[in-house]
Amino acid sequence: MAHSTQVRPFSRRRLRHEALASYAFVERNFFLVRRYWGWEIAFLIYNVTSSLSVMYIGKAQQMPGQDLILYLGIGTLVWSYLRSVFANISEMISWERWEGTIEYTMMAPVSRLTHMLGVSLFSVLYGIARTAVLLLTLAVFFDVSLANANLGGALVVILFGSLSFIGVGIMAAVLPLLFTERGEEMTFIISSVLLLVSGVYYPISVLPGWMQGLARVSPATYVLEGMRATVLDGRSTAELGQYLLPMGVIGLLTIPLGLAIFTAVERYAKRTGRLKRSG
Amino acid sequence: MSVTVQSPAVQRPTASVPAVTVEHLSKVFVRYSLVRRRPLQTVHALHDVSFDVQRKEIFGILGVNGSGKSTLIRVLSTLLIPDAGTVRIFGLDLRADEAQIKRLINRVSVEASFFKKLSAMENLLYALRLYGRAGAGLRADIVEILERLGLDRSRVNQPLEQLSRGMQQKVAIARAFLTSPVLLLLDEPTTGLDPRSKRDVQEFILQLRNEHDATIILCTHDMAEAERLCDRIAVIDSGRLIAVDDADGLKRQATAIAGMPVDTLEEAFFHLTGRDLHEDEAPSGVD
């Protein structure tokens, strides 16, 4: 007779355990950020200087009637946020492989949904904090007017955008699980392609036709277009359907699909012995 | 040394089933060529392995590097899916009841495996929250167990990378212990430790069994350690289980094979496997 450790899936105890485990990932990543503070500052300075460089290009090219500085500022801020969310989620496996902790995390009694939830929650909080610092710094250098902006609408766009990027991040996190050495490089390439095709610094209409096709499946495109519609054009939240709908659909599809793929690939990794540390 | 630690919210096994039942377990690793997907190398890491481990037993697994010891531990840890055979842990099936089994086990591997920049406290908080441990006393429990393992209080908040290997291994033991596992899987936990640290860890293993009802599977290639700690010892070679018995029983089996008295476990291992335990690696090359 087997002993009883069965816990009902939605019992209060089980939910408490899963919530605590989710918090474990948030707290752990916060500890890591605190311990790697030197690198955090270095990356932040790099972020600030590259954003300033882009916005100064805008200032040099300033044309009457078009707020190019704000256009580029939105691009650099939104991309900084999305890139941060994507990187934190997609690199969760490669980071743990490198540290040597992956086996302990994967054998812990935590559902993969909880694992992803914790990592995603941290990535959103971290992304917001970094972007806020970046925004405040840029505001010191450039006097941009947000009088026309629909900031509530911008928040809705970021919320939908975060969901869609979490899904894409989870799907990308599969690569380091599959390819012990090369997976992280692949996620870096994905992020680079998203930067190129999503209209971070230019409208996607200037891209060749085939790249515009890629832009239409990138959630970043809709986040950027939605943000510019709310901040630059002051479009009301009710008018954001054309941006929110694709982001919502991408999020609704990619989050469960990403989880399902991750679970299947985890099983594959366990069959082939790939669930181990490297480095 | 006595340690009292609050258990996480997991019911401990009560039924009189063996702690571990392994039947006809096999695991093969195949490395394929990148382009044509042709098998380049096939390694039989475990071949038709069967054994039982009783509750509160310390069960040793002896083998040279590459004999399949670590593969066996990784299967029991739910990190590897076997190709054939069944594994039951306290009556639960390893494949069907993986989530429940994860609540009952923990592991200490030969590498301490921590976030190197984080302190012992930060690493242990993370690990324990994953196992449902929380509450005001958690930090105090961590400090208490680390002190009892011989880690000075002043070291608890230092990054792990600043601690010696022996200290890191003690933190790894504390991580496993604080989750109150009923089955503890130890994969060469004392390899590379100085004699004092080794002794401390061995004492702790005995205490875990004696005072906390833990069942322990211990992979080692330290004969003295196996003889001192283990109730029974399985000898594994090239993925096959050669013999299972207590230390004296293994010596008797070796005496029968050798046709002359075998007095030490090292000699017994040599006669049972045809290998010196200090050989670098078995031909299979997988551990």
Image: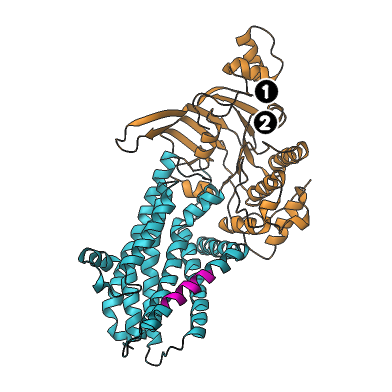
Look at the numbered discs 1 and 2 and tell me whether their residues touch, using CB distance below 8 Å.
yes
Please name the amino acid that badge 2 sits on.
Cys
Return the x and y of residue B132 as percentages of the image width and height.
Answer: 58, 58
Looking at the image, is B169 positioned above or below residue A12? above
Element on which disc 2 rests: loop
Please tell me how crowded label 2 is: few (under 14), some (14-19), or many (20+) other residues with Cα within 10 Å: many
**What residue sits 70% from the left and 56% below the top?**
B142
Using the image, name the chain to which the residue with label 2 belongs.
B
Determine the image quadrant of residue A65.
bottom left
| In this picture, residue B249 sits left or right of residue A103 | right
Read off the residue under disc 1.
B247
Chain A representation colour: cyan
Spatial CA distance of label 1 from label 2 is 8 Å
**What residue sits 54% from the left and 27% below the top?**
B67
Instruction: Give the total number of marks visible in the rendering.
Output: 2
Read off the residue under disc 2.
B230
| In this picture, residue B14 sits left or right of residue B138 | left
| Highlighted magenta segment, given as a residue range | A44-55
Viewer-closest of A124 and B172: A124
Q: Residue furthest front?
A: A60
Please name the amino acid that badge 1 sits on.
Ala
Q: Are the residues under marks 1 and 2 on the same chain?
A: yes
Question: Does the magenta-highlighted stretch encompass residue B243?
Answer: no
Question: Does the magenta-highlighted stretch encompass residue A54?
Answer: yes
Looking at the image, is A74 positioned above or below residue B110? below
Chain B representation colour: orange
Viewer-closest of B265 and A50: A50
Element on which disc 1 rests: helix
Secondary structure, magenta segment, majority class? helix
Viewer-closest of A181 and B271: A181
